[in-house]
């Protein structure tokens, strides 16, 4: 195994007047323990719980360095996923080195507060989401052999570093090109072909045998996503027939009218769109009954400028979507991709024409719950028990 560099975090983070020490201490807080928290409401119906992405360990103004954001996480969530800190761009700065500093801080903080941790992700099949060195890597005279060696090394090193501290992994993220419906072209899929999926999932199963292994993607309803949905079903069917060790389908759930890649969503979720989405979900769950909602938020381009009106539209869409998804008994947990509007990745996407802050998360910049938070809570209350 090549050299691993680990910058251990020795700092003490102040949180709500309590000292949160990384490593081996008793929980400072049992996160999401209030029965009326979103985590509590989810667990009451037999789900593992509710959680969110958080990140920016070293970033000024980031969610993790925002005391209010951490307090909301502790109040509402019992699951955490590092937003960026486990991606290749963060954890693999060079072909020879690994840097676990940021992820170690987040995993340690989660453990200090009795939170479960999701891993995101071991392979993202988009060249623009991987480090430059990987895109330019010289795979030598036997590129398939070297590609498999490098991929297995990465998966094995990252998974073994965390062991059973991570209970589920997004092993592969976004393998399907939403425009063509085929496999995305990047260095591993190029050199390994269809074997790429089997190799990465096999490596993850061997290195993290206790973890639920997830294929994660952002398909949505509407005609613009039809090829994406078809491509995902074909991929799932192929992996099932080849006995690739996939346990769970991760449905990102960036719903609404924003742009995800080359796909534009809608705010309607009308009867036809709902039927199309149900048809996809029925086909997907026939292959892989276990589900996770991994990255939920609502992009709300095209909504009116009035905050109250926007919030009603967003909450109504979220409630209808979550009601439908929670009817699938294999759904294990729901994750938001951020709890607070001003820390959300949505703000860096296509801006609203009026320049106003998007309101696609459960809490506003004043750390106050919004109708979207109520919609999520009501969906859990109305969900069938597992």
Image (cartoon, rainbow, N blue to C red):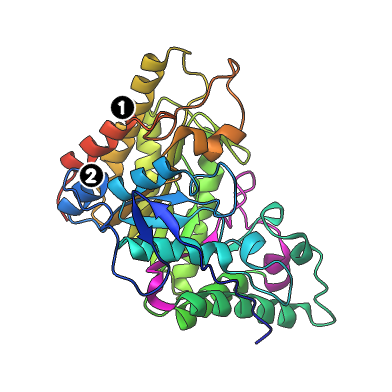
Q: Which mark is residue 76?
A: none
> Residue, x 56% and y 41% (percent of image)?
61
Q: Which mark is residue 37?
A: 2
Circle 1 Cα neighbour tier, 10 Å, few/some/many (<14 / 14–19 / ≥20):
many
Q: Quadrant of the C terminus?
A: bottom left
Look at the numbered disc 2 and give the secondary structure of its residue. loop
Q: Quadrant of residue 268?
A: top left
Q: Earlier in the sequence, mark 2 or mark 1?
A: 2
Q: Which residues are magenta?
A: 163-192
The residue located at (43%, 68%) in the rendering is 22
Residue 281, percent from left and from top: 37, 48
Per the model, the C-alpha gap separating discs 2 and 1 is 15 Å
Camera-nearest residue between 283 and 37: 37
Q: Is residue 58 above or below residue 222?
A: below
> Where is the N terminus found, in terms of image quarters?
bottom right
Residue 104 in percent (x, y) is at 50, 67
Asked whether 33 or 294 is in front, the reply is 33
Q: Is residue 288 shown to the viewer in this render?
A: no
51 is higher (above) or lower (below) than 121: above
Quarter where residue 307 is shown: top left
**Residue at 39 percent of width and 76 percent of height:** 164
Q: Is residue 272 visible?
A: yes
Residue at numbered disc 1: 371
């Amino acid at each position: 195994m090549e050299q691993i560099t680990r910058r251990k975090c020795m700092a003490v983070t102040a949180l709500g007047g309590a000292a949160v020490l990384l490593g081996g201490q008793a929980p400072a807080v049992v996160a999401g323990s209030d029965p009326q928290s979103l985590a509590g409401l989810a667990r009451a119906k037999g789900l593992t719980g509710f959680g969110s992405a958080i990140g920016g360990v070293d970033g000024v103004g980031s969610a993790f360095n925002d005391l209010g954001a951490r307090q909301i996480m502790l109040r509402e969530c019992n699951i955490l996923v590092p937003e960026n800190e486990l991606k290749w761009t963060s954890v693999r700065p060079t072909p020879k080195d690994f840097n676990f500093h940021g992820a170690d801080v987040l995993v340690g903080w989660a453990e200090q507060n009795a939170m479960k941790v999701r891993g995101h992700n071991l392979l993202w099949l988009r060249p623009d989401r991987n480090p430059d060195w990987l895109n330019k890597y010289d795979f030598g005279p036997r590129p398939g052999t070297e590609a498999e060696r490098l991929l297995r090394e990465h998966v094995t090193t990252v998974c073994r570093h965390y062991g059973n501290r991570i209970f589920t992994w997004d092993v592969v993220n976004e393998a399907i090109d939403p425009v063509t419906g085929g496999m995305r072209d990047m260095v591993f899929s190029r050199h390994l072909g269809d074997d790429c999926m089997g190799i990465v999932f096999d490596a993850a199963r061997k290195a993290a045998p206790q973890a639920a292994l997830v294929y994660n993607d952002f398909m949505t309803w509407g005609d613009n996503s039809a090829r994406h949905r078809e491509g995902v079903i074909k991929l799932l069917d192929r992996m099932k027939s080849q006995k690739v060790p996939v346990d769970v389908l991760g449905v990102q759930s960036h719903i609404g009218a924003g742009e995800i890649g080359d796909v534009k969503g809608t705010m309607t979720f009308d009867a036809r769109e709902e039927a199309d989405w149900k048809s996809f979900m029925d086909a997907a769950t026939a292959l892989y009954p276990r589900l996770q909602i991994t990255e939920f938020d609502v992009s709300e381009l095209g909504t009116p400028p009035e905050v109250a009106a926007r919030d009603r539209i967003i909450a109504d869409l979220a409630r209808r979507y979550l009601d439908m998804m929670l009817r699938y008994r294999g759904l294990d947990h729901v994750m938001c991709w951020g709890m607070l509007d001003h820390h959300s990745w949505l703000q860096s996407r296509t801006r609203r024409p009026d320049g106003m802050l998007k309101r696609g998360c459960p809490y506003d910049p004043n750390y106050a719950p919004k109708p979207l938070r109520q919609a999520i809570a009501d969906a859990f209350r109305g969900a069938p028990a597992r």
